[in-house]
Amino acid sequence: MTTDDELLELLTTALDPEPREPPAQLISALRDAATADLAAQRKVEFADASTVRRSRMRRSAPFVAVAATAAAFLLGGALQNQIDSKRNLLADGVVEFRTVLSIPGRKSTAAVTGIRTGIGRVVQLRTDALPILPKGQFYELWFVGPGDIPGSPNRISAGTFHPDEDGRSDVDLTAAVNPALYPRIGITAEPKDGDPSPRGPDVLQGAITIQNR
Amino acid sequence: MRQRGGQGEEMDDVALRRVVQRAVQADPDAWEHLYRRSYTRLFVYARRRLPTATAADDAVAETMLRALDRISTFTWRGAGFDSWLYGILRNVVFELLRQNMPTKSAVFDPEHEGDGATGPLEALVKRDQLAEVRAAFGQLSSDDQEILEMRVVAGLSAAGVAEATGSTAGAVRMAQSRALHRLRVHYEAVQGDN
């Protein structure tokens, strides 16, 4: 007759799993998502620091501040506006979903974060899995709805992009799409032919799970 | 307190807190470390409930992404980081099952999945005994399986299981006792059959 402790020990051994390694592409996707968070934090910190620097200047040397403000207005106003705008969007936004795009049987992946903001969704894409396309082509990110098939698409574009010269795609796209109605994301390679409809098959795709927040 | 990790790795509480602190700051290395450390146990939990290994992988990946998103809400006042992760994974698995994913037809047996390698403990006579315990475990309800798995595979305390399942430590101890009793009944029946 086995005691409770012996039975538990047997069960522990019986259920003890062989160590497993997580798939490399999923590790990569998690790292990409963490890197995207880190970059977003730094953007906010940079914008905040910039605001602090400007206010210190005003306090310590008014005439210098006037000149600096004028210079900033003339030379850097547009850039500052962009930073402030981005900061406000990200700071006020709520992360609505995260997903990993992939193609079954391939190792390519991309990390996508959807942030709900006052003007729609900011979609942050981070991947180094998309090859640089030949001249005259670009990538397009789509929110994909039910029943979407080649020839009868049901999808809305969130924007287009190119990888940088190192093959890195680190882009933020803005789209007024409800992911609950378009619950998948796909990326296609498109020719610059002026036709706005999707042409190629998805080179990466994934399902969106809306987070309860 | 020492906690069980993947690949037989153990990490003490202080080391885990350091890694989690870096993870709060979105350090990719810290997240990779947590992923590797937790993967085996989370995968096995998910695999036992989902129909395919791919679905289990997806569930664990989704769990880690949600953890990344919610790490700022995590505190050490609860039963610990592993309980928190299991709580997230449990929700992810429920959501996947609700999305009309077909349930598995047989209990997942880690020994018969993957490369099928066996450890040194599972030799000869003991192999039969372990197979009988697995068979008995497979006959338990999913609730009984879950509570025993969280206690013996994940190594969670009663408070940890309570946090992950939205219960209380006292209720977990009672449920564990009942689950162990039912395991014994099935185990003795299996032994009688052989």
Image (cartoon, rainbow, N blue to C red):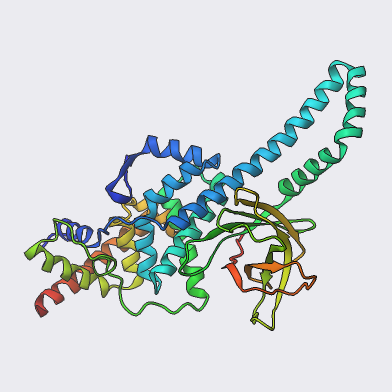
Quadrant housing the N terminus of chain A: bottom left
The residue positioned 69% from the left and 79% from the top of the image is A153
Direction top: furthest residue: A61
* Front in this rendered view, residue A144 or A192: A192
The residue positioned 70% from the left and 78% from the top of the image is A154
The residue positioned 64% from the left and 79% from the top of the image is A146
Q: Is residue B88 among what the camera can see?
A: no
- The location of residue B70, given as percent across then percent down, is 56, 50
Task: Say left or right for A29 vs B6.
Answer: right
Task: Say left or right for A143 vs B79.
Answer: right
Above-or-below relation of B34 to A7? above
Task: Say left or right for A194 vs B137.
Answer: right
Q: Is residue B141 among what the camera can see?
A: yes
* Front in this rendered view, residue B115 or A213: B115
- The location of residue B102, given as percent across then percent down, is 44, 79
Task: Say left or right for A149 vs B161.
Answer: right
Residue A161 sits in quarter: bottom right
Residue A7 sits in quarter: bottom left
- The location of residue B95, given as percent across then percent down, is 51, 69
The residue positioned 75% from the left and 67% from the top of the image is A192
